[in-house]
Amino acid sequence: MLSAETKWEIFLQITSGEITQADAARKWSVDVSTIIGIRRTVKDAALAALAAKPAGRPRSGTGRWSRPARRSRS
């Protein structure tokens, strides 16, 4: 079984062009379908993480970016 760190390293090497999917499969003694699955998992996780947060800055007056209420000077 490949560790998460190893899977990440495989993904980086393939996407950077350092190694082909077939070469990665041979290097780590797994089937090419395992390599394809790693790439699919990383893509799905990245898309889910990016979709979970709205783009841009929060609206003013909401959330952690809101200004504190002014106190009157009486």
Image: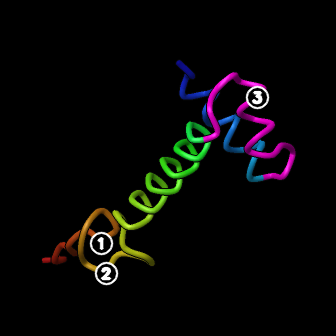
Q: Give me the residue at 62% from left, 32% from top.
A: 31
Q: Position of residue 40 (x, y in %)?
A: 51, 52
Going by the numbered disc 3, the residue's amino acid type is Arg
* Badge 2 amino acid: Ser
Q: Does the magenta stretch include residue 65?
A: no
Residue at point 84% right, 43% down? 19
Q: Is residue 59 left or right of residue 35?
A: left
Q: Give residue 9's position: percent from left, percent from top.
A: 70, 34
Residue 73 sits above or below residue 39 on the image: below
The quarter of the displayed image where residue 22 is located:
top right
Q: Which of 51 and 74 is in front in this view?
A: 51
Q: In this view, does 37 lie above or below 53?
A: above
Marks 1 & 2, CB-CB < 8 Å contact: yes
Q: Mark 1 points at which residue?
A: 67
Q: What element carries label 3?
A: helix
Nearer the camera: disc 3 or disc 2? 3
Q: Name the residue under label 2.
A: 60
Q: Can you give x and y, in whole percent of width and height, for residue 41 in the image? A: 48, 47
The stretch of residues the image draws in magenta is 16-32
Residue on which the image places disc 3 = 26
Please give the label number shown on residue 44.
none
> Could you tell me if the residues under marks 3 and 2 are in contact, i.e. CB atoms within 8 Å?
no
Residue 30: x %, y % from top left: 63, 27
